[in-house]
Image (cartoon, rainbow, N blue to C red):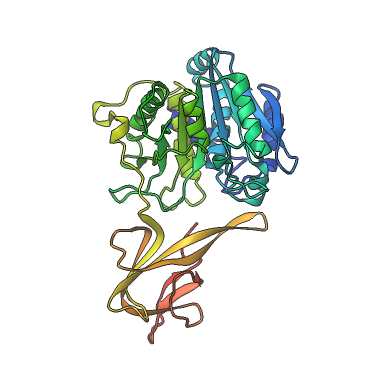
Amino acid sequence: MQFSQWYQAHFEDRIKGRYLPLQSILPLLKEYAQEFEISVIGSSENGVEIPCIEIGTGKKVILAWSQMHGNESTTTKSIFDFLKLISQKDHFQDEISHFLKKHRLVIIPILNPDGAALYTRENANEVDLNRDAKNLSQSESRALRELFDHIEPDLCLNMHDQRTIYGLSNGRPATLSFLSPAADAKCSITPARRTAMDLIEGIAGYLQQIIPGQVGRYDDSFNENCVGDTFQMQEVPTILFEAGHYPGDYHRETTREYIFYALCKLTGLIQGKPTPENTTDYLSIPENQQNFRDVILRNVHVKGVEGLTSVALQFEELLIDGAIHWQAQVDSIGDLDHLFGHEEIDGKSANILMNSYENVFVGAKVIEIFADNATKQVFFRDSSINI
């Protein structure tokens, strides 16, 4: 059986979508407590316990954490896909046994439970935990650092989501991006950073065979307040995972599958070397660019703008009644030839209005955009994109 076949038949379908609060994974943690070691490493600023999962008995320690930003849930789903693979007894038993004997994997599935409940990047005190590595002002930051100091990991996995604005120069979205964070302002290639780069090369080389041209490299600007940079400064190889957009996949159900494969490749469950044409040097992985918008309406006339122009829309994610809704807003108007749209619409030289016959302007929330003529042709309606 191939890993892709196993995944399609057995992924963890009890969790899905973008909104993933702690309550969603508690039944899974209760179930896995029969097989793995489940503990609590601390509490959030609102007093919510932060769970931790430990598997394997080996000497090489890997520390992974997800939802440091509460609204970045894709990698959490992938972690539970990976745990389901590890816990089953029917397939890949040699590979799994080898991994568990050589490694000890310590996972914080949701580091920021308060932010996860609110679907916010920040925690309950509106602090970005990934800018709190130096000050350790928040209880969640201290819990992670205390665990890091206690288990002394050999490798760290800092797991995040990135916005749909990120793409590559080839006009494809950055579905997955990785980074070996800098350990100093000069972005020196230290031994720890080199190790992380080598591991990323293996992951990227494998992924290029299944999503060619959609694997990127995240910006490595140094910031000692960021957790990845701090741990790399401590000479512990650290890899940043960024789960990005796959065409049509606003719930990130396809992206979670590719993160799962990345974890399987990193941990040695997926073996073998990439084919020569997919061999990847770290610095040859294309760097992310902010060159995408969710929708671009091209070749239209907008009041106050001379000649044909383009209008870019970006979706804002809103938590409403326990589900995520996407609200379109006008992001920019003008010559947008430098941008790609996940959805591209030809306005066919129409004069356009939006909503209740309003002129189009940056920052406007959009229900629909239509032609200001007898046909009133609708070019965009908030329900017209399947997200």
Extreme residue toward the bottom, this view: 374
Q: Can residue 14 be seen here? A: yes
Q: Nearer the viewer, residue 47 or 11?
A: 47
Q: Nearer the viewer, residue 239 or 261?
A: 239
Q: Residue at x 44, y 25 (%)?
A: 266
Q: Position of residue 384 (x, y in %)?
A: 47, 65
Quadrant where the N terminus is found in the figure = top left
Q: Quadrant of residue 150?
A: top right
Q: Residue at x 36, y 32 (%)?
A: 204
Q: Position of residue 155 (x, y in %)?
A: 49, 23
Tell me if 339 is positioned left or right of 119 in this view: left
Q: Nearer the viewer, residue 372 or 374?
A: 372
Q: Position of residue 164 (x, y in %)?
A: 44, 52
Q: Residue at x 51, y 21 (%)?
A: 91
Q: Is residue 349 above or below residue 196?
A: below
Q: Is residue 49 above or below residue 70?
A: above
